[in-house]
Structures are given as C-alpha cells and as structure tokens.
Amino acid sequence: TRSTRPQRLLAAVQKNATRGDPRSVVKAIDEFCRYTEWAMNVGDEKGCILDSVVSEVNPATVLELGTYCGYSTVRIATLLPPDAKLITLEFNPDFAVIARQVIAWAGQEEKVHLVEGSSGDLIPKMKEQFGVKSFDLVFLDHWKDRYLPDAKLMEAGSVLLADNVICPGSPDYLDYVRNSPKYRSQYFKSHLEYTKVEDGLEKSVFLG
Ligand SMILES: O=c1[nH]cnc2c(O)cc(-c3ccc(F)cc3)cc12
Ligand SMILES: [Mg+2]
C-alpha cells in the first residue's frame, strides 16, 4: 500500500542528510517540503524566528506540543546546551514513529524525550512524572483548539511561543494572551511554511 507523507519525509532525510548532522536534516526536510511535497513543519522562515526566541530564552527545559516529524524538535534541540531537556508530546503514534527516527538521524536523542499521548492528559502529569514544575519555554504547534486550554494548564512561569496563530489560526488563544494582564504578547509576522500565505508566531511572556 501507498507510503504516508511522514514516511516519504523520513526517506528524504535518510537519503539526503548526513547522520549526526542536525543542520543537514533540517535542510533536507525543507528542500523536500519546498520542492517535492508540502508538509506541516514550522519550516525555514518561521524556523529562524523560533531559533532566535530559543537562543534569547536560553531554556534549561522546553516543552513542545506537537512533534509531527520532529523538524522543530531538531531545530530546538540543536540550540540547547547538553544538560538541557526538551520534552515533546505527540498524539499521533504514526507521527511519533517517524519523529523518533528523524531525531535519531540528527543525533539529538540525548536531549529529547518524546512522549505519546494527548497534551490535555499529559500536561497535568508533567510535574510528578518528569519532576518539572514549569518549563522555561513552551512551543505550541499541535492543534489550534488546544492552544488556549493547554496554556491555562501551564500558567506557571513560561514563555509561550505559538505557531499558526493566523493560519490555520487560533483566535481564542490570541485574544486571551493579547488581553490578559498575565502575559506580555508579541506577534512575529511571517508566512505559512513553504508558501506566500500569511502566518506568524506569537510570543507570550508569563508575568506571574
Ligand atoms: O495542524 C497543525 N498543527 C501544527 N502545525 C500546523 C501547521 O504549521 C500548518 C497547518 C496547515 C496549514 C494550512 C493548511 F492548508 C493545512 C495545514 C496545520 C498544522
Ligand atoms: Mg505549525
């Protein structure tokens, strides 16, 4: 039977990227998605904004909601010091299988802990399971309808960075973080990955 898009993306990584070289993995995925088959990675343009926010926050602990094929997981992990921890949650087991292999090809397994399940179930368990009271940075890139409820589960001192706040869009989340006295929010205008359609990232600093 026909392969899946994540399987084809992984094959492109294994064919075109150098094992243990995370930048070549990022480049191989971006080229595959731009020239062969679109996929919903944060992409190169928004990826540079993600990189700058990660570097600025310099987090010891990161939570990523929505792993997909591990593209942003690799981008973030590459910027973290060796003792930092990145926990990434993925609901779809077929995506998780691929992401683990992409992360391994990039040589980033040490810093990454991929957990399968729903963010709504797993976030409340984070504290006891991983002994992490709060995360220095949370990257929201899973499902637009979960952004707001999950943000409310995590109001304990993080910087939130949300993908796709315009396309597909998360209006209730945007309204909340932009109008709540608990956050200072900033919009980074960009484009939907590999397209000319407007999209952007919203960075929201929890004020405590
Ligand atoms: O569902 C998504 N989760 C996380 N990121 C996404 C992302 O960056 C883009 C899209 C997306 C955008 C336009 C379209 F026509 C089809 C899918 C979905 C997700
Ligand atoms: Mg996205």
Image (tube, rainbow, N blue to C red):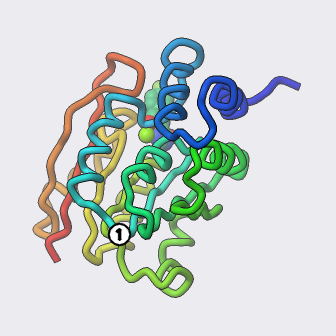
Is 85 drawn above or below residue 96 in the view shown?
below
Q: Position of residue 86 (x, y in %)?
A: 47, 63
Front-lying residue, 207 or 147: 207
Identify the residue shown where x is 51% and y is 19%. 31
Which quarter is ligand 2 in?
top left
Give residue 25's quadrant in the image.
Answer: top right
Coordinates of residue 96 in the picture (x, y in percent): 67, 51
- On screen, residue 2 versus residue 24, left or right, reads right
In the picture shown, does residue 3 fall above or below 94?
above
Q: Quadrant of the N terminus?
A: top right
Residue 179 versus residue 142 in the image, above or below: below
- The residue lying toward the viewer, choosing from 187 and 88, is 88
Question: What residue is drawn where x is 38% and y is 18%?
Answer: 195
- Give the residue type that dot 1 points to: Ala
Quadrant of the frame with the C terminus: bottom left
Depth order, front residue of 137/119: 137
- Residue appearing at x 68%, y 31% in the figure: 14
Q: Position of residue 125 (x, y in %)?
A: 53, 80
Front-lying residue, 194 or 109: 109
Image side of residue 179 versus residue 98, left or right: left
The residue where tag 1 is placed is 60
